[in-house]
Image (cartoon, rainbow, N blue to C red):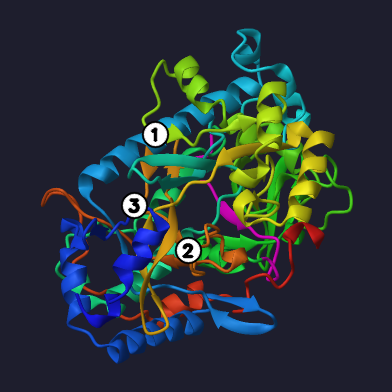
Amino acid sequence: MSDLFEQYAAASERRGAYDEMFAPGMQTRRSYGQVAGALDALSLSDVTARADSMARTFLDRGVTFDFAGEERPFPLDIVPRIIPADEWSLLERGVQQRVRTLEAFLNDVYDKMAVVTDGVIPRSLITTSAHFHRQVHGFSPAGGVRVHVSGIDVIRDQAGTFRVLEDNVRVPSGVSYVLENRRAMAKGLPEAFGQQSIRPVEEYPRRLLSALRKTAPAGVDDPTVVVLTPGVFNSAYFEHTLLAGLMGVELVEGRDLICRGNRVYMRTTAGEQRVDVIYKRIDDEFLDPLQFRSDSMLGCPGLVNAARAGGVTIANAVGNGVADDKLVYSYLPDLMRYYLNEEPILANVDTFRLEEDEAREHVLDRLDELVVKPVDGSGGKGLVIGPDASRDELNALHKRIVADPRGWIAQPVLQLSTVPTLSGDRFGPRHVDLRPFAVNDGEDVWVLPGGLTRVALKEGSLIVNSSQGGGSKDTWVLADSPQVPVERAPRPSITLREQVSVWPIESNWQDRQSDQQQQ
């Protein structure tokens, strides 16, 4: 390999992680042959010029974030993450199994709670979850689906085994990066892209729209779908705009909707139009001020009653957050056996439940060796990596655990797999995870080929979240036969019509306000 990888082997060995591109001894894995060949032919100036061009593309299209008041393009690295067909088949089946389990669990939890009666999980686990909403207990959502869209976070451990890190079935985000990364990478590294049989990703908007329409209320032949956004200051507003444009549906805010007679209507210049399906990108607590936070201006009064009456489908369903609880996550293998009578295809990361006395004592004695997470945290918030924490931080964490053991779990520190990532004048190993996105229409669970690979840009860091300084990589899933649709050449430049339909009103969409709920 070129001088760009001169110090890579030594740095990789220090991390002790599974490397996605190189086997021990710096032997290039077969799936990375084309990428290695393309990079070997490039100089440092070539690589940095291409990386700068990709960043400018993101800046032009509004894929940016606000860092200390400065508008910056969201980091996309020039080396893709490549998944061979056989490995993807395993991941795909594992994600589908997980989504089916979560769907069955949520239907049960908001109905008979047989899983509690049969002793699989304790009732207190459900009733003490911050996102278990009694307001939606006892009814089935229109269309019969609760988990329309899910993002299942997966990592590869030191042995190269895929494990699930957490589930996201409330308001999973990040698919816009998948679509934009592919557009940029097709031009950023065309030598490798054009010679690989890569599964396409642009089918996602069509699949999502089809699933939303399919789960519309009974008796609606031509449903009207909208995307509900909290507004331009939300960190994922670009994604809301992009998906609405690609699906050809209206992007609305709560003030654009009105509920009357358990029906939902959208205000338009031509008058009110009935809305049948709402793809919400707002947390449940801010969706309906009559049922949740009365001070919320993000949602619309009456939405929950309209959903209960079967007058509108809300995707994802209200109350899904109980399945995102990391304590519930620890029971997923048992739930798979209970609901599906199947063994897990993808294993969990070993997890300590700190409400259990023995586990709590074990963890409190070893806080400096473990990763401790709040059960309702997201985006890396509240996470404490023991080996990197100060004594004061560990003492404060000890007190919080003792005061609220139900609010925490602990896991061993795993060296997430690494992928070469451009850093300065050479490539270095950086830790990555993967978020495959699944779309559920009630009959089939379709998994987007690849998903979002997030990368920790800081050397040695295990935190990949964008809010904590992480970036992303394009994820290439290799096709296993000529019959599988593939991408072989860069797509044409975006048309003016596409620009009008998908560009956000305001490009500075990342972290303008720390949290949408504070609006």
Q: Give the amino acid type for the residue marked by disc 2 in the picture.
A: Ser
Which residue is label 2 attached to? 176
Residue 199 in the image, given as x and y percentages of width and height:
25, 56
Q: Earlier in the sequence, mark 3 or mark 1?
A: 3
Give the residues drawn in magenta, as a range: 219-234
Q: Give the amino acid type for the residue marked by disc 1 in the picture.
A: Leu
Q: Mostly what secondary structure, the magenta segment? A: loop
Residue at the far right: name it: 295
Residues packed near mark 2 inside 10 Å, few (<14), some (14 to 19) or many (20 plus): some
Instruction: Between residue 179 and residue 275, name the one nearer to us.
Output: 179
- Residue at the image position 70 percent from the left and 31 percent from the top: 308
Residues packed near mark 3 inside 10 Å, few (<14), some (14 to 19) or many (20 plus): many
Which of discs 1 and 2 lies nearer the camera? The answer is 1
Residue 453 in the image, given as x and y percentages of width and height:
42, 58
Instruction: Between residue 177 and residue 343, name the one nearer to us.
Output: 343
Which residue is label 3 attached to? 18
Q: Earlier in the sequence, mark 1 or mark 2?
A: 2
Measured Cα–Cα span from mark 3 to mark 1: 17 Å
Q: Is 96 covered by the magenta stretch?
A: no
Q: Disc 3 vs disc 2: Cβ atoms closer than 8 Å?
A: no
Q: Give the amino acid type for the residue marked by disc 3 in the picture.
A: Tyr
Which residue is label 1 attached to? 346
